[in-house]
Image (spheres, rainbow, N blue to C red):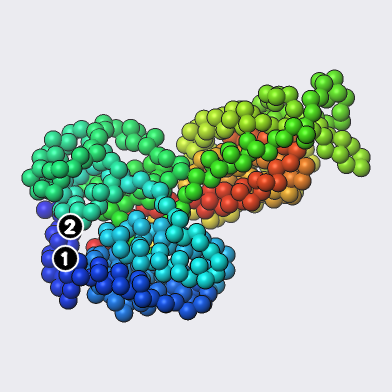
Amino acid sequence: MSKISERMKLINQYYDNLEYRINKKEALEKINTLIKDIKLEHVNPPQRYQQVASIIEKNIYLFKACEDVDTVTSIINYLYDASIKMTFDSQLFIHGDIRILYGMDIICEEPMTPLFLKTVFNEFDLKCGYDYIRQLKFNYIITMVLLQDSDLYAVISYLKIKPSSLSKISRIFVHETIKKKFLWLIKKHLHFTRHMNLPISVFQKTHDLETLFRYEVLNIVSIWSEDIIAAKDLAGFLNRDIVFINSLLEFCSGVKFVYKFSYDNDMHLKIYNISPEDYTYTVHQSLIKCALYSYNLFYDGTWQIPIKGKYWEKQSETEVIIYANATKHDVEKCMISAMKAFIVWSTWSMASRIEALYRLASILECHGKYLLAEIVLHCIKVPDISQNELFCDYDERLEVSNMYKPEGVAWIEAAAESNLFNYLARFLIKGNCVIVISDECLSTIAPYCNMFVTAKIPPGVINLLSFKNAKDTYGHINLHMQQIYNSMKYIILPLQ
């Protein structure tokens, strides 16, 4: 018997031996009553999370009758952990409830537990004038990958213990050599699946799994294999947000759930609406040539004339600079270019991306841009970008490794040129492509675009769209930058 099968046997015995003072139906009814009767004091978020955790602990037998023991423990730990972190970092107050609810919506088997948290948080936020929690909808995709050497009996045992997991799995990818055996085991042991249309697909090579990623949702995958080293290699290779090895939805409080609200789609809508006719005018090419400086748009590794032929001018005491004004057609072409480039850039090794940025820093120095070169070099040397973390949860039940992961195309902007290059370098090192938004109040990378080409940074990795006025997008871009920059991949391996 494999180690994984032994673990599944122990877990199965553990759950069979659990004795609750109450059955699930009665527990659900009492939790529902608890939801109606609960009253929280008007306190700050850290204190509120402590109160909610305390309520769950006092009624723990109700929640343990509905969820497995580890899930309930994880919920309590998440709440206390969030409370402690918020006490020392006020920035975490923002969207703290959303992160907690996102995680609970994923890991809980019964909807009553997330509903309890959602109701409690919403009750508090209504007192503060907020009404966003009741409208939240979380998007995530869970897939399972069974490699050729998977312990199929362990997989079946796991699904038998937690049958609700199947309802959350979008697709099961099975290696072609074990498909027949897996289907036979399902038919023999998982009788509750007889009336289910299980979404099973066959794959031959792990590279077939590479493109199965959606940027607008949280991507979770469970990899099963007897070869832990090979499974970890695959976990590192796949572009996913959370990867489980020989388990599924076993979390600890150290894992952050990065919610995704499809900022990219909203960004398009915002940017499509920021090119009013009265801000721009058609400039004859002869006038552009006479200007001290004039810049077109920059994407796909070269300068691009705006499709609508619109330009605007930026005046200072000493000079007039003419910039192209992007419209939605330019935005679409730029985005397509950046997405194609991301497929290439994200597969470059960290060392290769850093080497390209070293070349850029050297070119900046040659042109006398010493401060910008120093900023790029500093970003290269920041340890938290290139190093991974490895930790265990409180009871050493899980091994968790987390690393930065490329998320896609990052829209960035900054008023100061130094900040702009700081963002640019950090996003590029992580494997993201960037689209810089500039207007009359923001800095631009226009004077440096030719340097990016000289530094042999692939076409489409760095792009520039300029507008006369992009103020309506500032807040949106800042949220988008936070989401992309904080994007992490977690690889979770059970130790017991």
Pointer 1 or 2: first along the chain: 1
Q: Which residue is mark 2?
A: 161
Of the pair 25 and 287, the residue shown nearer to us = 25
Residue at 53 percent across and 48 percent down: it is: 484
Q: Is residue 254 visible?
A: no
Horizontally, residue 483 falls left or right of residue 416, namely: left
Question: At x 26% / y 72%, what residue is drawn?
Answer: 30
Q: Nearer the viewer, residue 36 or 121?
A: 36
Which quadrant holds the C terminus?
Answer: bottom left
Alpha carbon of mark 1 to alpha carbon of mark 2: how far? Answer: 8 Å
Circle 2 residues within 10 Å: few <14, some 14–19, many ≥20: some
- Dot 1 falls on a residue whose secondary structure is helix
At 49% from the left and 38% from the top, the residue drawn is 346
Mark carried by residue 15: 1
Q: State the image quarter where residue 70 is shown.
A: bottom left
Going by the numbered disc 1, the residue's amino acid type is Tyr
Amino acid marked by disc 2? Ile
Q: Is residue 222 left or right of residue 186?
A: right
Image position of 429 (left or right of 19): right
Q: Residues within 10 Å of mark 1 (few under 14, many from 20)?
A: few
For mark 2, give the secondary structure.
helix
Residue placed farthest to the right in the image?
Answer: 318
**Residue 150 locus on image (x, y percent):** 20, 44
